[in-house]
Image: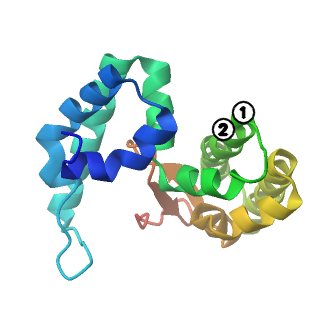
Amino acid sequence: MRHSNITQRLRAALSLLDASDAEFRAIYRIHQPFAEILYPSAVGGSISFSPDQARQRNDAQKQVADQLKAALGEQRAADYARANNFEYQNLHRLAQNANLSPDALNRTYDLRLTVAQESMRIQDSKLSPADRTAALQALVTSTKAQIAGHLGSTLADTYVKNLSWLSALERGYAIRLNPDGTSMTYMMGPSTPPPTR
């Protein structure tokens, strides 16, 4: 179990979570039936999913998330989801030598949820395209200021450069968190089919 493919994939998350032995076993047990869908072996160094495989993957992620909430409780499941996100792991690495509190890191990471919700509110509003773009740009400016407030300007500048969702906002896309809580859908205009990443 400790050396399985699942554990290797989840090692960073389990470390950041500081998972107990019981939590580790529960997380492993829940992921195990979905291992081939969630953690396929790369062929030629890359993995691509057909539309059907992407749907299966999304369904599996939702089932795993629901089972984790039942097994770990709402708060620890949320802590695990955050620790399992590459963006949060990157933020943690950047901040290791900056002597920032876990609360500052968590508040910075959690901005993505409130920003996504606000961007969708703007997206669904009756604003003209020009006003919608201006509102999204104002949201970008506000978000960058909040990140700088949490991390300090130097670290914030480095962190912001790697945020694809903030770059999408700058280009006029609204963003929506997908059910797994980690990936996002980008939407341009109220009637445009969303590209997914």
Determine whether label 1 and label 2 are within 8 Å by CB: yes
Label 2, residues with CA under 10 Å away: few <14, some 14-19, many ≥20:
some
Q: Amino acid at mark 2?
A: Asn
Give the x, y percent position of residue 74: 45, 20
| Residue 86 shown left or right of residue 22 in the figure | right
| Residue 31 shown left or right of residue 85 in the figure | left
Q: Amino acid at mark 1?
A: Asp
Using the image as rendered, state which of residue 87 and residue 185 is in the foreground: 87
Q: Which quarter shows the C terminus?
A: bottom left
Applied colour scheme: rainbow
Callout 2: SS: helix
Residue named by callout 1: 103
Callout 1: SS: helix
Residue 111's disc is none
Give the x, y percent position of residue 50: 18, 68
- Residue at point 71% right, 52% down? 95
Residue named by callout 2: 106
- Residue at point 56% right, 50% down? 88
Give the x, y percent position of residue 15: 46, 40
Using the image as rendered, state which of residue 51 and residue 8 is in the foreground: 8
Inter-mark Cα distance, 1 to 2 = 5 Å
Give the x, y percent position of residue 187: 52, 62
Label 1, residues with CA under 10 Å away: few <14, some 14-19, many ≥20:
few
| Residue 99 shown left or right of residue 175 in the figure | right
The answer to whether 28 is drawn above or below residue 21 in the figure is below
The answer to whether 7 is drawn above or below residue 50 in the figure is above
Residue 159: name its quadrant.
bottom right
| Residue 3 shown left or right of residue 145 in the figure | left
